[in-house]
Amino acid sequence: MGETIDILMAVYNGERYVQEQVESILRQTYRNWRLIIQDDGSTDGTVSRLQPYVQAYPKRVFLYQRKENSGAAHL
């Protein structure tokens, strides 16, 4: 089956697009992957839209949540 690929997804207030992103990953033909999602303290419905995927794919989709937004990325 090959090596497991980790897909890292950072989200923040992505309620509008996050389901489409996850569905796109689920449609991939390569099947040996894990999706690791880091929510950066979203205040919209992002997390509630991701929960069904975490429940449906417990060995494949993982969600980690920060309580507070960490701020913009710095160089």
Image (spheres, rainbow, N blue to C red):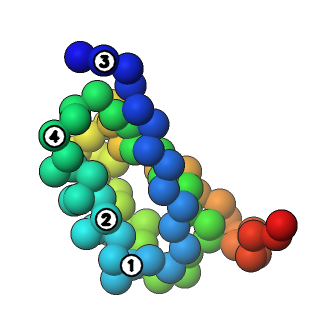
Q: Residue at x 74, y 76 (%)?
A: 72
Along the line of sight, the residue nearer the viewer: 3 or 70: 3
Q: Is residue 8 above or below residue 17?
A: above
Amino acid carrying mark 1 in the image: Glu
* Distance from Cα at disc 2 to Cα at disc 3: 24 Å
* Distance from Cα at disc 4 to Cα at disc 1: 25 Å
**Number of dots carrying numbers:** 4
Amino acid carrying mark 2 in the image: Gln
Callout 3: SS? loop
Q: Position of residue 24 (x, y in %)?
A: 23, 59
Q: Which residue is mark 1?
A: 15
Q: Residue at x 16, y 40 (%)?
A: 29
Callout 1: SS? loop
Q: Are marks 2 and 3 in contact (CB under 8 Å)?
A: no
Whether residue 62 appears in this view of the structure is: no
Could you tell which of marks 3 and 1 lies nearer the N-terminus? 3
Q: Which residue is mark 4?
A: 29
Relative side of 70 to 57, left or right: right
Mark seen at residue 21? 2
Relative side of 42 to 4, left or right: right
